[in-house]
Amino acid sequence: MKILLTTCSYQDTPGPHHELMESQGWDIVRERGPLPESRMLELAEQQFDAFLCGDDAITRAVLEKCAPNLKIISKYGIGLDKIDLPATKDMNIPVLFTPGVNHTTVAEHTFGLLIGITKHIVTTAAAARQGEWLRLTGHEIADKTMGIIGLGRIGKEVAIRAKAFGMPIIAFDPYWDEKFAAEYGVKRCDTMDAVLTQADVVSLHCNLNDETRGMIRTSKIAEMKDGVVILNCARGEIVETADMVEALKSGKVGGYGTDVLDEEPPSKDHPLLTAPNCVITPHIGSRTYESVPRQAMKSLTNLINALKGEGECNCANGVVIGSAPTSKPKAGWSGKVTIS
């Protein structure tokens, strides 16, 4: 088996996944992702049996060039927006992913960004290292309304932490968990706009798709409170970069904390790099010594089980692996498929 491994977190972080992968006897080609389509097309000439990937551009063109050898795509992580899922279904290539492995660490990172912005920690700490005693005045987050867009696993963990900090919580999600909301005092909003107009802090935890791409733009920002803080540990493309820069410059947005950008890594002249009150981290929200081995082992065991035709794996695109489950999954289905 020839495997393309591209995720840097997987490769850089120690854990049992390294020994398990080496024990498989695979021919492993290692690259430093995320890779653009052009590089993926170059690599496709090597005719891989499987990808163990991060956020690489796996387009229809890449998939067509990999056919018919490519059997499995195993995603390290949960975001699938860089993979052409309709093309994988057309070609009957299962796409595996790792739900439930990084929600704790991403939620912690979200609050790290929030505290960093509201207390000016990044700015003042950098000034202190330069010998400047810059005593800026910050804000408390207690009693500020936390608005969550996407109350899935990560959004729920953010809500739990917001409650602990004494923040009222409102949220929007089309799949509402009434039991969780009741337990943690989360008020349901019927629309995303209702969250945007009422929240002091807006935290984005939704998937990137045609509906969410560019949804935080000038017209939506205008509906928000003056000085709102926006947090993005989802996908950079959910936010229109130029509109966010202008809102930060005008002060309409009081702070933007993001772990993701529309261009990764960013060019040296990326406008958010010099925008005021903007804290950017290099897509490390799930990169911890605890989370990485969980994600790595899940993506690896998904791949091993699928290739061997035994055990369980999490399939995201509804392609049946081995024997079919009791009812055939629909497109976009997410769950466990027992294969034999």
Image (cartoon, rainbow, N blue to C red):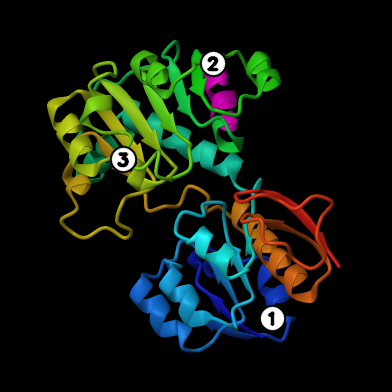
The residue identified by callout 1 is 22
* Residue interval drawn in magenta: 156-166
Rendered residue at 58%/63% (across/down): 89
Marks 2 and 3 sit apart, C-alpha to C-alpha, by: 23 Å
Q: Is residue 132 visible?
A: no
**Mark 3, residues whose alpha carbon is within 10 Å: few (<14), some, or many (≥20)?**
some
Callout 3: SS: loop
Q: Which residue in the structure is indicated by mark 3? A: 214
Relative horizontal placement of residue 298, taking residue 218 as reference (left or right): right
Q: Residue furthest top?
A: 143
Compared with 140, 40 (above or below) is below
Q: Please determine whether, in this image, residue 211 is positioned above or below residue 33.
A: above
1 or 28: nearer the viewer: 1
Looking at the rendered structure, the kind of residue marked 1 is: Glu
In the displayed structure, 307 sits above or below 273; it is below
Residues packed near mark 2 inside 10 Å, few (<14), some (14 to 19) or many (20 plus): some
Q: Which residue is mark 2?
A: 188
The answer to whether any part of residue 257 appears in the image is yes
Image point (71%, 19%), residue name = 179
The amino acid sitting under disc 2 is Arg
Residue 126, image x and y in percent? 26, 43
Residue 333 position, x and y percent, is: 65, 48
Q: Mark 1 or mark 2: which comes first in sequence?
A: 1
Query: Which one is earlier in the sequence, the residue at label 2 or at label 3?
Result: 2
Mark 2: which secondary structure?
strand
Measured Cα–Cα span from mark 3 to mark 1:
41 Å
Nearer the observer, 212 or 163? 212
The quarter of the displayed image where residue 119 is located: top left
Give the image location of residue 53, x and y in percent: 53, 67
